[in-house]
Image: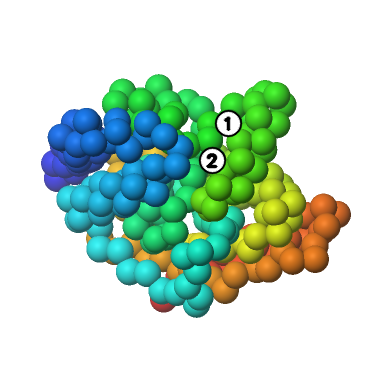
Amino acid sequence: MKLFKYFFWLLYRIWFYILVALPILILFPILLISIAKESWYPFFFRIARLWAKFILIGMGFAYRIKRDEIPDKNKSYMFVANHTSMADIMLMLVTVKNPFVFVGKAELAKIPLFGFFYKRTCILVDRSSPRSRQAVFLRAQRRLKSGVSICIFPEGGVPEEHVMLDAFKDGAFRLAINHQIPIVPITFADNKKRFSYTFFSGGPGRMRVKIHKFIPTKGLKIEDTKRLNENSRVVILKQLEAFNNE
């Protein structure tokens, strides 16, 4: 029985990478055109949302999204969520209809095929480099001015398996204050169980999502960053606890 589980997990991981790569290979020429100009990003984003749905459905993930508030399609936001799974990227793309740009780890650009488009459409950060973090800030400012939103997983990485929610970094909240855009906290409940970074684990099932009421930043100053950070974290943490008690 145990051997069967390990065999299933191995095939399940391989299947995930097939689902990630297959649409990219099929749509490669269209994807290349869609990233030729930064102004064409919304078109690329629509394709990315279809790619994400294809993967989630193909993996047997039944996502259920509850919304306390719906983003205005004509406004920019800072989307923040807890980070536990490789499927977080896909679930975020399905959850949010407003075009947004991920701020993510530079290491993901090394993934074959996926990394080619990742590094051309996302804002990459090397967290060990202060110069890289400053460059991220400037690139994010430019994208926000073009009307696109930003998505950051503010834990700054994937926490240990036993940690429900790690401390948040300040970058997302400083950026939101600087541009006076609302924070949109989002809670992912089941991603760690469905498809964590532990290789021999996971399986089909539900993925619960909650988009919380937006946290305004109008009138806030940089010295309010820590308070905004903690308020956002508390919202997500309480929802994780509520999901666990269901």
Query: Is 106 located above or below residue 30 in the figure?
Result: above
Q: Secondary structure at mark 2?
A: strand
The amino acid sitting under disc 2 is Val
Left or right relative to 158: residue 37 = left
Query: Is 47 located above or below residue 244 in the figure?
Result: above
Left or right relative to 54: residue 111 = right
224, 158: nearer the viewer: 224
Q: Quadrant of residue 156?
A: top right
The amino acid sitting under disc 1 is Val
Disc number placed over residue 125 in the picture, else none:
1
Are the residues flagged by discs 2 and 1 in contact, CB closer than 8 Å?
yes
Residue 112: x and y in percent read 31, 23
Residue 64: x and y in percent read 33, 69
**Residue count near mark 1 (Cα–Cα under 10 Å), binned few <14, some 14–19, many ≥20:** many
Q: Which residue is mark 2?
A: 103
Q: Is residue 241 visible?
A: no
Task: Check the image and name the residue furthest to the right.
Answer: 223
Residue 172: x and y in percent read 65, 49
Q: Is residue 231 visible?
A: yes
Residue at the location (70% across, 24% down)?
Answer: 131
Q: Quadrant of residue 34?
A: top left
